[in-house]
Image: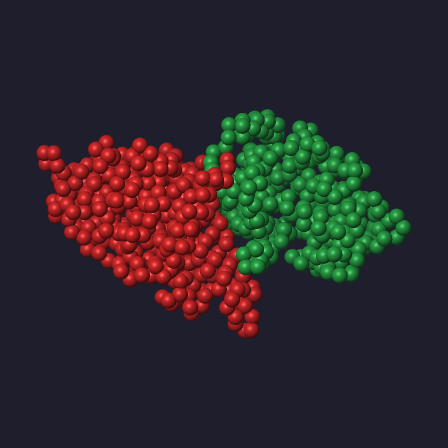
Chain colours: A red, B green
Amino acid sequence: MDFDFSDDQEQLRDAVHKWVDKGYDFDRRRAIAASGGFDRAAYTELAELGLTGLYVSEAQGGMGMGPVEGMVVMEALGRGIVMEPLTQTLITSAVLEGYGPDGLKTAWLGRIASGEALVVLAHQERKGRYNLSHCATQAKEAPDAWSLTGVKHMVPAGAHADAYLVPAMIGDSLGLFLVERNASGLRTAAYATQDSAAAADIHLDNTPAQLLSRDGLTALEHAVDIGIASLCAEAVGVMDKTMAITIEYMNTRKQFNTVISSFQALRHRVADMKMQLELARSMSFYASLKLNAPADERRSAMARAKYQLGVSMRFVGQQAVQLHGGIGVTDEYIVSHYFKKLTQLEMTWGDTLHQLGEVSERMQDTAGVFA
Amino acid sequence: MDLAFTPEELAFRDEIRTWVKGNLPADISHKVHAAMRLTRDDMQRWAQILGKKGWLGWAWPTQFGGPGWNAIQKHLFEEECALAGAPRVVPFGPVMVAPVIMAFGNAEQQQRFLPGIASGEVWWSQGYSEPGSGSDLASLKTRAERVGDKYIVNGQKTWTTLGQYGEWIFCLVRTSNEGKPQTGISFLLIDMKTPGITVRPIKLLDGECEVNEVWFDNVEVPVENLVGEENKGWNYAKHLLAHERTNIADVNRAKRELERLKRIAKAEGVYDDLRFRDEIAKLEVDIVALEMLVLRVLSAEKSGKNSLDIAGLLKIKGSEIQQRYAELMMLAAGPYSLPFIFEAMDAGWQGDFPGDNVSNAPLAANYFNMRKTTIYGGSNEVQRNIVAQTVLG
């Protein structure tokens, strides 16, 4: 049992921190948000740091790293509320590596690692909410070819991605497919989400697709769990920075002739925020360290982690706004953007109530980090 | 970074598990698992079994006869004891005063006091709080005046846990009124049989006499019972607090009590009520998160690479969890937690308990008892002040 980071992991963190501080400041983020919430150039910079190949094996041209490195990177990106969806790349590359046929791997993994291709998960449907087995999109098999028909919502960078991993029904069971953006019958409708990032609906009308896995639910559950672990780490970074912004403000802002950080009512709120941050960081470690566990154990760990993160994110975000006072609810000041990001993350991959239900359902007689 | 214990750590845990299983008396673990009343003899018996093995001072270094375990090993030992249903070791001797004597006492004091603590023969109490000094401990007023080769002690201590059994007491006493309140405090070891000491148990809201008032009326204490230097006692007390960091979170006991909560909820038919069950689920996540927090502190202590200054967080979260499981246990039994039959908490009681489940007898009492946890050891509000200080400056 050991929670120290290796020198290589520390270097990786430093490199990403440096990029966030120097290469993705608030002005650049604002400019990207104003032009739709996704910047291919910024995404390419992530690729140049090697991050898009983090979960791609060395054989396929990636770095072949694991969940701890993923955590280190996502936490650092969270500090800058980076909108380019690296989590999606981590998910789709890991799913292709783990479940894809050789042909698809060879065709896509190298290009994902280099940043040439952005592949994202397109699974959300109107009536599915957080239920992964709900899927109305249908897959049709013709000789040598599949085609999909249906609509997927809230696809991150949906209008910018080069391909999508799409769950669709093969008869009664869920399959997972790869669909290219320029495939026939595919239409995207782009919009921004509350965190200013780009998203889109993907309309599929007899759109050609390649089969990734017939056991789509297993792959999709794994995909979402990778997403949860990544989100937990990102959220810790967002909260860490949110706290730092709030602390700096409280030590500068004066009311009643003194800095507001001197007021005990406010100091106790900050202590409670610190509590939530450290519980969240602990559970982010837990999520990443359980990501390679057997599916049942992994699923249960992710539900616990995401529940804690959900509680923490809502508390830290709301308190940060409150402690800022009026400036906290303006668009101009930075903290509201962190709050919105935290809010969006809470509702991504299953919100807090949903995760509580998962934990509740899975409870055993004994419990703990190792049970 | 690795969540798994090493093979050596796992082998160590198995060794502890086997030993505890073979040496913890079944009548004692039965009481602990059912939250029945523990007697002085129960606590003393287990302490002396540990003492004989050399594990009552499980956190002690080898030079003082301890096993010299690292942070992880100490944690595994505590966990195995807690899960097996061992009583909490009364901490005042082996956990609290012994490290101070080791660090600041002289060789003569070490030889005189440590063996009796290590064996579990001598029952120690803690004399810190006073009627006028709760969370503001440094304002304490019990005076020790140097007269020749003696201190004459006058004053009153309170909330002295299990002080009715105490044979020795370590006290913070005022030896000077110069300067800041913290600078005039000394650390004295006092034989409780000395004339002038009166102990009066305080009955608490659960009906138990868990704490006491202790009066000192011209009590003569030989100067050789002063630990370290006069007026430096506050520093020694702070050192002591550093030894309680993860202990105070008591996450191992929380894991055991979560299991008990689930048993009670099932027996009372509320485990399948989703509204109730979700509350258990929340507590389960709280406990896992606290355990991760504790493991992070232990890992940092073991490697010495990152220091984690989060003792205040451990106290706050640990105490809130203790209160919550006690609360949920009581709520699970609902009206059947309400009968107050004092003897029903004694092992072997043969009376009729309303609803025929005598294991509901201690639930309300434990709930009431647990209200202390957010008050003692520095109230949680004081802990929040400390946490805020580290964050905001």
- Residue A137, image x, y percentages: 18, 45
B247 relative to A343 in the view: left or right: right
Q: Residue at x 47, y 52 (%)?
A: A277
Q: Residue at x 25, y 35 (%)?
A: A105
A365 relative to B345 in the view: left or right: left
Q: Residue at x 43, y 63 (%)?
A: A321
Residue B55 visible at all? no
Q: Nearer the viewer, residue A25 or A332?
A: A25
- Quarter of the rendering containing residue B271: top left
- Residue B368, image x, y percentages: 57, 51
- Return the residue found at the far right: B148
Residue A348 visible at all? yes
Q: Nearer the viewer, residue B195 or B264?
A: B195
- Residue B187, image x, y percentages: 76, 49
- Residue B388, image x, y percentages: 55, 58
Name the image quarter holding the C terminus of chain A.
top left
- Return the residue found at the far left: A143
